[in-house]
Image: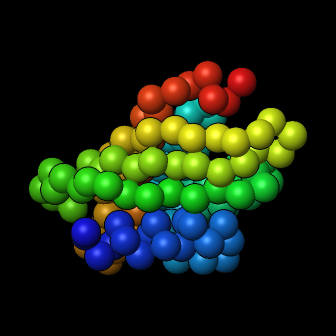
């Protein structure tokens, strides 16, 4: 597994935005549907705080990573957990991610198999 992705996913699985701060800058952009695209470190961290509050438990397991070149990767993940008041949650996700030369996330975009899981 790519070390950057492995370390990022470990920090993501902590569900602690303090662990995620080091990954983003004011130039970072992420798009995690059903939300709209978000840019800037503070807005990205606020989005993660909002997402984490919706779950009693949430975790991701990466199964495959494909190197697209130029510090860009495509990887497949299974997410699972429990949504507050809505029971168990499971989804398959594909993610496109690009890192800067210094290892910061420039761009991250998720593609979900089951969008009804968010209703």
The residue depicted at 25 percent of the width and 69 percent of the height is 1
Taking the image as shown, residue 64 lies to the left or right of residue 91, namely: left
Q: Can see residue 53?
A: yes
Taking the image as shown, residue 17 lies to the left or right of residue 86, namely: left
Residue 49 vs 85, above or below: the answer is below
Q: Can see residue 72?
A: no
How is the structure coloured here? Answer: rainbow
Q: Nearer the viewer, residue 61 or 65?
A: 61
Residue 67 vs 103, above or below: the answer is above
The residue depicted at 37 percent of the width and 71 percent of the height is 6
Rendering coords of residue 80 (x, y %)? 58, 49
Residue 115 position by quadrant:
top right
Residue 118 position by quadrant:
top right
**How many numbered tags mark residues here?**
0
Quadrant the C terminus occupies: top right
Residue, far left: 69
């Amino acid at each position: 597994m790519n070390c950057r992705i492995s370390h990022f996913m470990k920090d993501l699985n902590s569900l602690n935005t303090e662990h995620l701060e080091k990954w983003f800058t004011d130039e970072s952009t992420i798009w995690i549907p059903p939300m709209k695209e978000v840019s800037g470190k503070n807005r990205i961290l606020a989005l993660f705080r909002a997402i984490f509050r919706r779950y009693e438990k949430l975790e991701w397991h990466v199964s495959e990573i494909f190197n697209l070149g130029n510090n860009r990767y495509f990887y497949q993940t299974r997410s699972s957990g429990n949504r507050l008041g809505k029971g168990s949650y499971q989804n398959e996700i594909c993610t496109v991610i690009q890192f800067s030369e210094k290892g910061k996330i420039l761009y991250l975009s998720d593609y979900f198999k089951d969008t009804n899981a968010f209703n």
